[in-house]
Image (cartoon, rainbow, N blue to C red):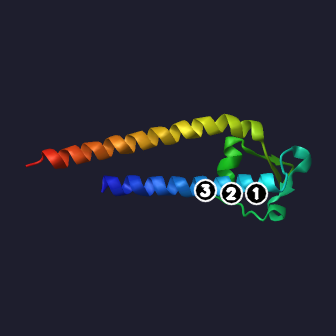
Amino acid sequence: MSLSLLVALVILMELIRYSRRRIMNTLRYHDSLSPGSAKTLAELGIRNTFAVSTLLLSGVVKKEGPDRYFLDSDRLRKLEGWQLMFLYVIFTIAVVFLLVVWAKLLLSP
């Protein structure tokens, strides 16, 4: 049960990461990289989803005025290092967990 929960959590994290990356790429494609070039979500073809909210909370996407958004590239560079380290930690925990399960299976009578 624990392994399936861990797998589900990793899949969920990857889906959110994929959505966030897609939104950031859309902002870059539409050159929405500064307050002056900020665009509405409708202009970008993006729905206001959980991924947009997490990008706003992290400061990677900033809101200009009531409904215009842009990508803060400096903030993104700072956070990418931390996100990568977090993924490495999760991966390491998963590998250790799998090794422990594998060892128990080998050593059990």
Mark 3 or mark 1: name the one nearer the start of the chain. 3
Q: Residues within 10 Å of mark 1 (few under 14, many from 20)?
A: some
Task: Identify the image quadrant of the N terminus.
Answer: bottom left
Q: Which residue is rendered at x = 43% and y = 58% of the image? A: 8
Label for residue 87?
none
Amino acid type, label 1: Thr
Q: Is residue 25 above or below residue 100?
A: below
Q: Nearer the viewer, residue 42 or 107?
A: 107
Q: Residue at x 70, y 40 (%)?
A: 76
Count of numbered circles on the image = 3
SS type, badge 3: helix
105 on left or right of 44? left
Q: Secondary structure at mark 1?
A: helix
Residue at which label 1 appears: 26
Mark 2: amino acid: Arg
Q: Are marks 2 and 3 in contact (CB under 8 Å)?
A: yes
As shown in the figure, which amino acid type bears the numbered disc 3? Tyr
Q: Residue furthest right?
A: 36
Q: Looking at the image, do the residues carrying marks 2 and 1 touch, with CB atoms under 8 Å apart?
A: yes
Q: Residue furthest front?
A: 106
Residue beneath label 2, please?
22
Q: Is residue 51 visible?
A: no
Residue at mark 3 = 18
SS class, disc 2: helix
> Going 68% across and 44% down the picture, which residue do you hit?
57
Residue 84 visible within the image: yes
CA separation, marks 3 and 1? 12 Å
Query: Who's the residue at 13% across and 44% down the image?
Result: 107
| Left or right of residue 27: residue 104 | left
In percent of width and height, residue 28 lies at 79, 51
Residue 94 locus on image (x, y percent): 38, 45
